[in-house]
Amino acid sequence: MAKPDANPLLPGATPAQTRAILGAMRAVAETGGTASDADKQAIESAARYIFGVNATFDTIASAPPQELVRTLLSSGLDAEAMKFLAVMALVDGTLDRTKIAEVMRYATALGVEARYLDEIVEAAQGKLQEALADMTRANMESITEKPWSGDVVKWLLPYTGDAVDPALAAKFEALGQLDDDTFGHAFWAHFKENNYAFPGLPTALNAAFCVPHDSAHVLSGYDTTARGELLVSTFTASMHRINPMAGHVLPVIFTWHLGVEINAVAGMEGGALDPAEFWHAWAGGAATTIDTFAPGWDFWTYVDVPLAALRERWSIPATGLDRPHFS
């Protein structure tokens, strides 16, 4: 198995802590039945990208809540472990009430409370719209870095009527004149290949969202398929650590894996979580030294720089992160 091209997310975890967290992930996966192939891939990938170890599913023993509590005592890993367990409840693409209840058994034992846990519990209890509304608020609070109570669709599609801005669109269009190897040209090509309208045009997404979001696509190498959108948002959650689970990871798992529509602009599709690549995206976002959603990040500063050079500067593999299969 090749050496990972992203630093492990939790390299400081001890072997015992690693076994206990992976074992708890297995226990969640096996709640109510046997683990699926996707579950097994997810846990083996987590071993590789979260902890930097090679382990097969069959060598990982289930760890009940009290074992996890005992092993993680005073480690500070409780909150991180709960994120991984929550994801494992959703890997099979269904909102399984028994698995979510099992996740909450671990959360109670560890004393972890979190917004994203409240969301999955609400969804499992049939309060799906309430859960989706909170995911939307969490996402917008992360993007805008302020409390949110507005109309998401209007915010996402601002260039209508008198707000059309042809000069802004022309500025983005001019990126096509840059050298082919530059970040700016790659961004322009990304829009052209996907038939996206540049900010300023009536059908375009708000530059405050699409510039940092699509820059993350270009930098990470994740495409705009449902799979790619899920992965780039996972990368973003770990890069831009404001409401990472409640505002990024859960919304895209619901949208692109559970097939639940959060808003009309995003759309939806089921079954798109790549269990092997998911944790790679998570680790890659944590490893990068740039945050395209940070208030001070200026896209235009970097458009003339070769894409490969920016990836190297910002600790992203030269060819991007995407690895559909382990090599």
Image (cartoon, rainbow, N blue to C red):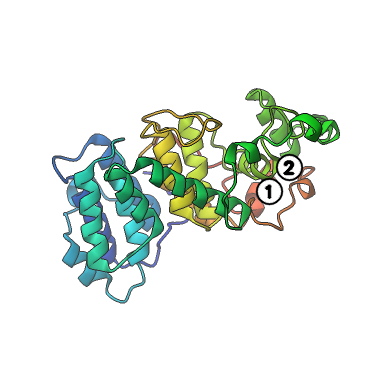
Q: Is residue 27 visible?
A: yes
Q: Position of residue 277 (x, y in %)?
A: 41, 40
Q: Residue at x 74, y 51 (%)?
A: 298
Would you name the residue on which mark 1 appears?
Answer: 310
Whether residue 152 sits left or right of residue 228 in the image: it is: right
Q: Residue at x 66, y 27 (%)?
A: 196
Q: Nearer the viewer, residue 260 or 248?
A: 260
Q: Nearer the viewer, residue 259 or 23?
A: 259
Question: Which residue occupies the extreme right position in the image?
Answer: 167
Q: Is residue 175 visible?
A: no
Q: Position of residue 113 (x, y in %)?
A: 34, 64
Q: Position of residue 237 (x, y in %)?
A: 50, 51
| Label 2 packing within 10 angstroms: few (<14), some (14-19), many (20+) | some
Q: Position of residue 160 (x, y in %)?
A: 74, 31
Spatial CA span between label 1 and label 2 = 7 Å
Could you say whether the residue bearing mark 1 is in a helix, strand or loop?
Answer: helix
Question: Can you say which quadrant of the picture contains the N terminus?
Answer: top left
Question: Which residue occupies the extreme left position in the image?
Answer: 33
Whether residue 133 sits left or right of residue 258 in the image: it is: right
Could you say whether the residue bearing mark 2 is in a helix, strand or loop?
Answer: loop
User: Label 1 amino acid?
Assistant: Leu
Q: Nearer the viewer, residue 149 or 103?
A: 149
Question: Can you say which quadrant of the picture contains the C terminus?
Answer: top left
272 is higher (above) or lower (below) than 96: above
| Label 1 packing within 10 angstroms: few (<14), some (14-19), many (20+) | some
Q: Tell me if label 1 and label 2 are in contact, CB under 8 Å.
A: yes
74 is higher (above) or lower (below) than 266: below
Q: Residue at x 36, y 34 (%)?
A: 258
User: Label 2 amino acid?
Assistant: Pro
Whether residue 317 sits left or right of residue 300 in the image: it is: left
Would you name the residue on which mark 2 appears?
Answer: 306
